[in-house]
Every structure is written in structure tokens, then in C-alpha cells.
Image (tube, helix red, strand yellow):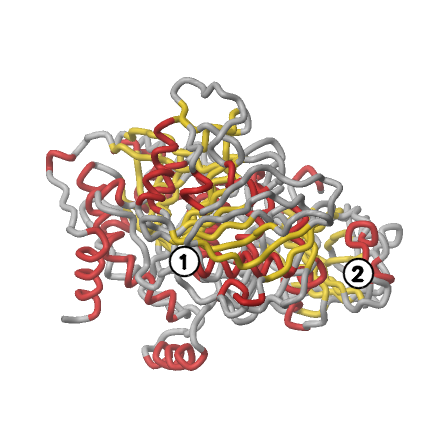
Amino acid sequence: MNRQVFLWFETVVLTFGFASTASADDAGKLIDLQLQRQAPIKAGASQYHKLQTAESWAPAETAIVICDVWDRHHCLNAVRRVEEFGPRLNEVVKALRAKGVTVIHSPSDCMDSYADHPSRKRAIETPKSAKLPDDITSWCNRIPAEEAAVYPIDQSDGGEDDDPAEHAEWAAKLKAEGRNPGLPWKKQAELIVIDADRDYISDKGDEVWSVLESKGIKNVILAGVHTNMCVLGRPFGLRQMAKNGKHVVLLRDMTDTMYNPKMWPYVSHFEGTDRIISHIERHVCPTITSDQVLGGEPFRFQGDKRPHLVAIVSEYEYETDRTLTDFAAKYLGRDFRTTFVYGREEDGNDLVGIEAVKDADLLLVSVRRRSLPAEQLEIVRKYFASGKPAIGIRTASHAFKLREPDVPAGHAEWPEFDAEAWGGHYTGHYGDELKTTVEPVAAESGHPILHGIPSSAFPSTGTLYKAAPVAEGATVLATGSVQGNPVEPVAWVYTRKNGGKSFYTSLGHKGDFESPQFLRLFTNAVYWAAGKEPPREFAVVTAREDLRRRWVPISLGTDLKSAFGPVLDEKGGPIWFRCGVRIPSVFVPSRGGDPIFFVEGTSPCVWVNGEAAFQWGRKENPLPQFGPRTHSTVDPIDANLLVVRFANLGDVGEFADQFVLGWGASGLVPGPIELQGAWEMRVGDDESWSKPKLPAKFALSPEAYFEANSESR
């Protein structure tokens, strides 16, 4: 059995149990879908509810666009992942086609291979739409909804996650095939069947748009690779469809990212994909999954072995909606898939998306005095009855018990939850004025949860809970004390009556999440509960370290000394800034000359698309101090990467009104463009930051991007 046939059989049979077949009876029937999007849990929050909306789409008004599922790629692991999900994507395409959905194949840069193909000719012969959107033939770096977002991964290294030796062998193989190892694709992968009698082939935005308009298509499904680059940015991609009024969705389990786990946020490749999908659901468009077309279960890569941690969070006292979400993002992304379920702002008794608990491998509870709707509490009860592991933090000891005697109609309590789930005995807490000291239990120093934690006592910022005595079957790992009162257990493990294992800690005040000892303890507990060995090495991500690990969004006008305080200092070393700039061709003067970048400031170093730029100029005297220098690398149509390096904070001063852009010959600058808004900042001394490994349109996050318009000329 050859590799492609084996992968097809393995994917179809093992992943969802059967190969879906679409009958003629399916033609024209409405397609029932569950669209998933995300919305802030409250105004200004950085945490999001996952919301589901049921819709039924008419096939005649629907198209699926398959983006860049090429026959080859320069990243070997990317090829392997396409080979794995490609057979299932083909089944989705086949089923949708049978229902009457229009299928458009869009393998970019490969049209020469299809010059005589009927599907290519069909796209070319489609009459051009009379109302083509502006820039529909261009790459789209961002839409307005993304401008205030923090892009979730750093893809500026190109995202390759290959083993270096395998990558070298793969590049040699591509070269031997007569391909350019950097751009090896020539056509769409044979895994996706093209119906010559019905489908379309195009990589051009105006052609794809014209096909959609000519057929009265309102709904568009995007699938393919790579989500964070081509699927988002192509002229036929998610951004262009969303901003120009199409009802577009991403087929989120039929896609992949170009993300290297060695780059920020230093999570697994699959977690990197999940974070891009979340970004899309929050700021671009909803998503769906392939099982909504084929039945069975959503596709999951065989290498994705992450246990699914679901956290239910509904309490206002300790801000765990923020602290736990940040904790998971920083410390669990390498080995866990996480879903957060938050209480509704207007009614904390209603947990939005509680159905996610049904798919959990590990449940984390941070709830305070809630009476859930009976059907929601039943989901939690069934989880604990299953014998699966659980973690409780702080108010989880009194999660489902109101102070008031009257429970709202249709709601339910679980008064015995503390004893049954955690083996605890919560009866209140000591006074706010008393300082809590935490001490690991010496006799349990060999327990995995205490791995890497010093035996010495450490402070907690929260009040000490009265939790003694714990139940038989519980093992106390740490105790807490306040002056003049008995010692109390603050962290323990417990074997429930059905054999399920639990960890509970009464720590978890918002200040505790700044304690290295607590962070290590809680990280270890999550790994232990999931049956995984806790990390051998553990480092708290400090504010300064964060600035060294990644590019941080920063706005012009920010006083860096006030914003970052002790993180930066006058002699703290180089500080880098970068942004993207797109200059439409209308901005290039008719008298000639390439675009020229001018930088106001104190002798910074400047690079444009990796090429060292001329020196600097000032707004009132925009001619460069050391003469103009044009750049053959500057693209007057597409995105350009501008990188600026200052020797130290003293040279930067206040990061305001520092940067302008101009163009022209002989240093003439008609109407310079002020680069006001969001940039990215990083501290350190790495020359590679000045030289991108791929074009700016792929490398940059959407918020640090400037796009000139005709009004600013």
C-alpha cells in the first residue's frame, strides 16, 4: 500500500470511522452548520466566550475555496501535515460539490500548470464583476477589527519546524526534482480531486470574486494552508472576503499554520494553530468543522496528543478570569489544549459554553457560590462521576453553594461538592489583616507537585482559608499559617471515592500569580493531574524577559520610562522597533525615484526589508543628513518591513513623532507620511532581527502595519 493510499485509509477509518458518501438526494438541500465565534466576556476584557450559532446555508449560494494546498512545500513537516488531512479535505469537497456547492481551487503561483485545464478556462471566461472591491487583487495584511488585537504568534522566522538534518535532505530532494527548494510548488496536491466539468481554478482575487458574484454566492468556506499567512492574507482569503461583505467561515480542522515552536509564544505547533484560529474567531470571521459536513468527529492530527484542559471560571473576588487565563497562556501551551468557560457577566450562574466539559480530559474549577442551571450542573456532576482528574483553586471549595437559602427556579446546588470533589472542609477564612505564610510539607518533598519548590516558607497575598480537617485519602502537600492561629492545609491531593484523583489549593489570590513558588506548584499540579511528568526546568516569565522573548506592541507617543519602569534603563542595551508599510503605486512620483524612508531621532540604525538604510532626517528638514539612498528592495505595491534600532533607552527618549516616510528622486519628499500608531518593540542585541527570513506580508503581525491611502498623499 503506497503512502497516500495508507494515509487516506488511516485518516478516514481511524479518525471518523467511515468514508462519507454524498448521494444525489443531497443536492440542493440546506447545509446545517454550527458557526463558532468568540466575543469578550465583558467590555474591554481580553478573555472571550466561545459562542455557537446555528445556520442553514443554501448550496447554490455557497462556495468552498481551497487555498494553497500545494504539491510540495519548502517545509517537510508542512508537507506531512497536508498529506495527513488532505484525504479528509477531499471528502469534504466531494460532499459539498454533490450538494451543489461551488468549488474553487486556488493554488497560488501555479496557474501555468493549469493553462489548458477546463476549470482554469472556466474561471478566466467568467465575466468580470462590474463592482470589484478595491485592492481585491492585492494581499490583505489586516482588517480594521484586527488593529487593536495582539497577534498571538511570532511567525517572522518563516514558521518552519523541521528537523535541520531532515530539512537539508528535503531541500536536496526538491532540487533533484528540478524544483526551487524555496518555492517548490507547481500545482495543487493530487490529494484534492478537481472536477473538470464543474470546478474553478484561480489564484487571482478579481477572478475568484467574479465567480462568486456571477453565481450569486453569499457564503464562502475557506480551507487549506497556511492559516496565519495565505488563508488570511491572499486576495481570495479570509480578510478580503470578510471586509468586502461575504459571509465567510474558516474550516478550522482542515487547515494548518506555519509556526515554529522555537519562536514566541514557545508553545506546541498545534497550540500555535489553535491561537491563530482564536484570533480569527475574535477578529475576522466564524469557523466550522468538517464533521458538520461529513458526520463523525472533527479531524485531529495524529501527532496532537495534548490532553484537553477545560477551566470553568465564575467568580469576581480574585480575578481568576484574568490570572488563570494568563497562566495557561504562559505555562501550559507546550503540552495542553485549553478551553476556558466563563460565567456570563450579567449572570455568573450561567456558564457560557459549559458543553466543552464533556470533551475534557482534565477539569479546572474556579467558581464561587453559584447555583447553575440544573442541566449545566449535571454536566459537572457527570464529569466527576466519570473518574477523570480535577483541579480546584481558591473558591472552588464553595463553588456550588449559595449563602442565600433560596435557589432560583430551574437552578441547582451541590453543597457536598467540597467534601466529595476535593476532600476538603471549608468553613471560612481568617482576617484580611493577617499575613499568610505557606510552607511545603517536608515529609512529602518527593511528591511530583513539590518538584523544584524550595523547602523554605514563602508568603501568600491572600487570606488563609479554614479547611481542616481534610478527608481520609487526602495527602497535604503544603500548609499555611497566620499568627496566633492553628496551621491549615493549603494544598493537597485527594483520591475520590470512585478512584478519580483531585488536587485542590486554597491559594490563588491574584497576588499569588506573581509568586515563583506558587506558579511552580500550580504548574506541577496541572501536569500531575493529567498524568504527565512536571517540567524539569521552570522559569517565571518576567516583564523584562518578555521583552527579550518577543516583539511587544507599542504605540507612538508612549513614554517608555513610564510604561516599562525598571524593565528598561538608560544603559540597558539596544532597543528595536519594527512595522510594516504598504505604499500603493500611486504614491511613486511620475518623475521617478524609489520610495525613501526617513527617520527622525538620535542616529538610529535603519533597515528596509533587511537592507541597511541611509541615515536619518528630521521632519523640519526631511533631506537625509548623509544623502539619499534608494532601495531596490522596496516594493511600491506590497508590504515593506521597516526596522529601527537604538543603542539604548537614552537615545530613544519618548517614542513619539519619530518616524516619517517619503519618496522621490534626489531626496525630494512631497508630502511625507507620518507613521503614527502601533509598532512592535523588543530589547536585546540580535542582528537577525533586522533581516527577515520572508517577505513582510508574511512575517508581520497585523497591528503593526501602515497602509497609505490616497487621502494622505
When asked about the image quadrant of residue 103, the answer is: top left
Q: Is residue 143 above or below residue 271?
A: above
Say left or right for 64 vs 481. Answer: left
Q: Is residue 691 above or below residue 248?
A: below
> CB atoms at circles 2 and 1 under 8 Å apart?
no
Which residue is nearer to you in this view: 615 or 481?
Answer: 481
- What residue is shown at x 26% (from left), y 47% (from top)? 297
Label 2 belongs to which residue? 568
Q: Which amino acid does the dot numbered 1 rest on?
A: Ala
Q: Quadrant of the N terminus?
A: bottom left
- What residue is shown at x 40% (from left), y 42% (from top)? 420
* C-alpha span from label 2 to label 1: 39 Å
Which residue is nearer to you in this view: 214 or 552?
Answer: 552
Crowdedness of circle 1 by 10 Å Cα count: few (<14), some, many (20+)? many
Secondary structure under badge 1? loop
Which residue is nearer to you in this view: 556 or 239?
Answer: 556
Q: Which amino acid does the dot numbered 2 rest on?
A: Leu
Label 1 belongs to which residue? 530
Say left or right for 21 vs 481. Answer: left
